[in-house]
Image (cartoon, rainbow, N blue to C red):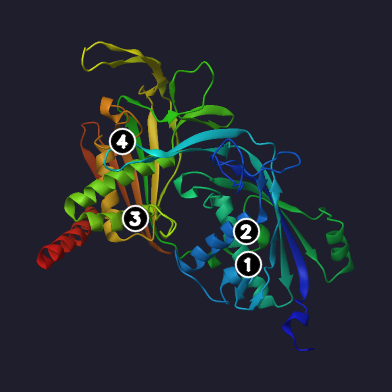
C-alpha cells in the first residue's frame, strides 16, 4: 500500500494566481440546459441574484482546446507528455492525473439581454422551413466577467517550465482575442479578450509566502498587458502548429440591406435591420450566422453545378458542418468560421410597402407594412472575415469563387434579395494562408479608380486552388459516368 501513487505528494512549491477582466466583444450565450422558459434557448443565470454565470469548466475547456490546437494542430491529439495534458490533466481507463490549473466560476453583473431569432433555410427554395424557427438569449457585447485561476507548480524544474509555457500559450489566446466562448462561437458569437492581467506568485517553501497565500495578500502583485512577460516565458518558445486560410475583406453597400430583427422598440417599424450593442450604442451589424448561411447555399450551388449532388453534399457538410436531421446523425464542427461585424456609417430610412393582389392588380387589403433597412451613403463599409481551419486546396478554391460572387454583387446577403437588397461592391481584400509556423502566403486585392482589379501576390497559386477544386469535382463526375 505504501507504494500506491495516490499516497505520493505532488510536492507543490509555488502557487500563481492569475486574475483579469474578460470583456465580451460580441454577444455571447452561456447555456442553461433544461428549462421551462418562454425563450427557446435561455441564458444560465445565478439563481440567487440573477447574475450571468461563466462556469470554470467552460473556460478551462476552451483554454485546453486552444492549447492542444497550438501544440498539435487542428483535430490532432497528443500523449501524456503533451503540454495540454500536463497542465489540464488526463485520464486513461482508471489511471490519470488531476489538473494543476484550478479555474474558478465567474459571475458577471446582471446581464443586459439581447434576443435573436434563428431559422433554418430550405436550400432549394431559399425560404424558411416550417417549424424550424427558434429564438435565444445572448449577453450583450461589453459585458465583463472577472476571472480567476490558480496554477500549482511542483518541485521538478523541468515540469515547472512546461507548465508555465503551456499556461502562457493558453492565456495568450485570451489576450489576442483568439478564443471564443459559448454557443455558436464559429458563427461570430462569444468573441472576448483580456486587456490587463493581475499576477501574484507565492513561494510555499517560505513561511512568508505560505502566509501571504492563505491571507490572499496581493502586496506583490504584478500588472501588465503581456502575459509572457509576467510569467517570464520567452516568446521564441511559443508553439503554433495551426494552419488556416483567412479572408479579410471590405465592401461598400450597393443599395440597401436588411437582416430582419424580431425584437425592437414598441414604436419601431414592422421590420428593422438587425442591431447589436457596441460600446453602449446600438449599431447595425452583419451577423456571422446570416453570412454563413448565404455562403453555404451558394457554395452548394457551385459545387453541384460542377460535380454530382452527392459529392456536393459531402464537401459542403465537411466545410460548413453536417445538417443534423435525426439523433443518429453524427455532428462535427464547421471548418469555416465567420464573424459578426459592425456595418459602419449606414443611412437608416423607413419605407412603406404594400402587397399587390395578382388577380386585380390593386393593393391587397390589410397588407400595408413599413420596414427600416440600412442604405448606402458616403463612407458606408461592410467588413467580412472568414477563416478555414486546416484547409484543403479545393476548399480554398471554393472560397475564392465565393469571394468573386460577393465582390461582383452576384451573391446578396440578408433578406429581400429578390427586390435588390443585400448586394455588395468589393473594395479590397487581404488573403492569408498560414501554411506552417514560419511559412505563410499573403495576397492583396484592390479595386482601382478605373474599376479594374489589382492583385498583389502569387496569382498563379490562387488560380491553382480553383483548378484543384475543378479537378476534384470533375474526377468524381468522370468516375460516375464510367461506372454507369
Residue labelled with disc 3: 317
Q: Within 10 Å of the Cα at label 4, are there few (<14), some (14-19), or many (20+) other Cα atoms? A: some
Q: From where the camera sits, is residue 456 visible?
A: no
- Left or right of 466 on screen, residue 110: right
* Mark number displayed over residue 60: 2
Looking at the rendered structure, the secondary structure element under dot 3 is helix
Numbered tag placed on residue 68 in the rendering: none
Residue under the image location 56 percent in, 50 percent down = 181
- The nearer-to-camera label among 3 and 1 is 3
Q: Is residue 9 above or below residue 131?
A: below
Instruction: Point out the frontmost of discs 3 and 4.
Output: 3
Identify residue for label 4. 427
Q: Nearer the viewer's eye, disc 4 or disc 2?
A: 2
Query: Residue 73's x, y, as percent?
Result: 45, 66
Above or below, 420 against 351 in this view is below
- The span from disc 3 to disc 4 (Cα, nearest Å) is 30 Å
Q: Quadrant of the N terminus?
A: bottom right
Dots 1, 2 in contact, CB < 8 A = yes
Disc with the residue nearer the chain's start (1 vs 2): 2
Q: Position of residue 243 (x, y in %)?
A: 40, 61
Amino acid at each position: 500500500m505504501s507504494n500506491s501513487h495516490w499516497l505520493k505528494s505532488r510536492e507543490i512549491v509555488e502557487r500563481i494566481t492569475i486574475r483579469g477582466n474578460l470583456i465580451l466583444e460580441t454577444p455571447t450565450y452561456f447555456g442553461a440546459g433544461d428549462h421551462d422558459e418562454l425563450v427557446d434557448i435561455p441564458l444560465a443565470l445565478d439563481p440567487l441574484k440573477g447574475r450571468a454565470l461563466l462556469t470554470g469548466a467552460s473556460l478551462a475547456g476552451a483554454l485546453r482546446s486552444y492549447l492542444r490546437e497550438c501544440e498539435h494542430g487542428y483535430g490532432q491529439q497528443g500523449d501524456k507528455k503533451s503540454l495540454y495534458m500536463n497542465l489540464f490533466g488526463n485520464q486513461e481507463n482508471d489511471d490519470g492525473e488531476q489538473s494543476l490549473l484550478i479555474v474558478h466560476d465567474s459571475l458577471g453583473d446582471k446581464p443586459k439581454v439581447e434576443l435573436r431569432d434563428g431559422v433554418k433555410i430550405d436550400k432549394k427554395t431559399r425560404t424558411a422551413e416550417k417549424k424550424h424557427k427558434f429564438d435565444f438569449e445572448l449577453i450583450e457585447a461589453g459585458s465583463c466577467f472577472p476571472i480567476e485561476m490558480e496554477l500549482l507548480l511542483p518541485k521538478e524544474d523541468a515540469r515547472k517550465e512546461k507548465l508555465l509555457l503551456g499556461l502562457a500559450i493558453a492565456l495568450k489566446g485570451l489576450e489576442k482575442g483568439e478564443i471564443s466562448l459559448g454557443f455558436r462561437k464559429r458563427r461570430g458569437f462569444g468573441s472576448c479578450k483580456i486587456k490587463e492581467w493581475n499576477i501574484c506568485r507565492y513561494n510555499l517553501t517560505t513561511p512568508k509566502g505560505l502566509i501571504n497565500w492563505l491571507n490572499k495578500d496581493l502586496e506583490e502583485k504584478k500588472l501588465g498587458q503581456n502575459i509572457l512577460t509576467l510569467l517570464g516565458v520567452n516568446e521564441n518558445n511559443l508553439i503554433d502548429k495551426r494552419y488556416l486560410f483567412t479572408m479579410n475583406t471590405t465592401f461598400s453597400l450597393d443599395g440597401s440591406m436588411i437582416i430582419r430583427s424580431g425584437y425592437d422598440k414598441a414604436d419601431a417599424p414592422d421590420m428593422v435591420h438587425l442591431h447589436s450593442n457596441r460600446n453602449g450604442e446600438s449599431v447595425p451589424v452583419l451577423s456571422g450566422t446570416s453570412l454563413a448561411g448565404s455562403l453555404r447555399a451558394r457554395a452548394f450551388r457551385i459545387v453541384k453545378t460542377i460535380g454530382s449532388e452527392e459529392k456536393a453534399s459531402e464537401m459542403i457538410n465537411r466545410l460548413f458542418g453536417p445538417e443534423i436531421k435525426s439523433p443518429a446523425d453524427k455532428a462535427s464542427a464547421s471548418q469555416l468560421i465567420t464573424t459578426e461585424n459592425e456595418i459602419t456609417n449606414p443611412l437608416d430610412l423607413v419605407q412603406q410597402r404594400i402587397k399587390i393582389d395578382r388577380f386585380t392588380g390593386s393593393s391587397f387589403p390589410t397588407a400595408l407594412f413599413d420596414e427600416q433597412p440600412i442604405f448606402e451613403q458616403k463612407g458606408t463599409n461592410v467588413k467580412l472575415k472568414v477563416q478555414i481551419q486546416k484547409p484543403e486546396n479545393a476548399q480554398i478554391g471554393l472560397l475564392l469563387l465565393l469571394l468573386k460572387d460577393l465582390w461582383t454583387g452576384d451573391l446578396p446577403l440578408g433578406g429581400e434579395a429578390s427586390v435588390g437588397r443585400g448586394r455588395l461592391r468589393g473594395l479590397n481584400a487581404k488573403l492569408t494562408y498560414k501554411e506552417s509556423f514560419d511559412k505563410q502566403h499573403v495576397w492583396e486585392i484592390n479595386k482601382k479608380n478605373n474599376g479594374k482589379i489589382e492583385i498583389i501576390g502569387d496569382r498563379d497559386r490562387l488560380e491553382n486552388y480553383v483548378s484543384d477544386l475543378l479537378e476534384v469535382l470533375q474526377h468524381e463526375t468522370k468516375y460516375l459516368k464510367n461506372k454507369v
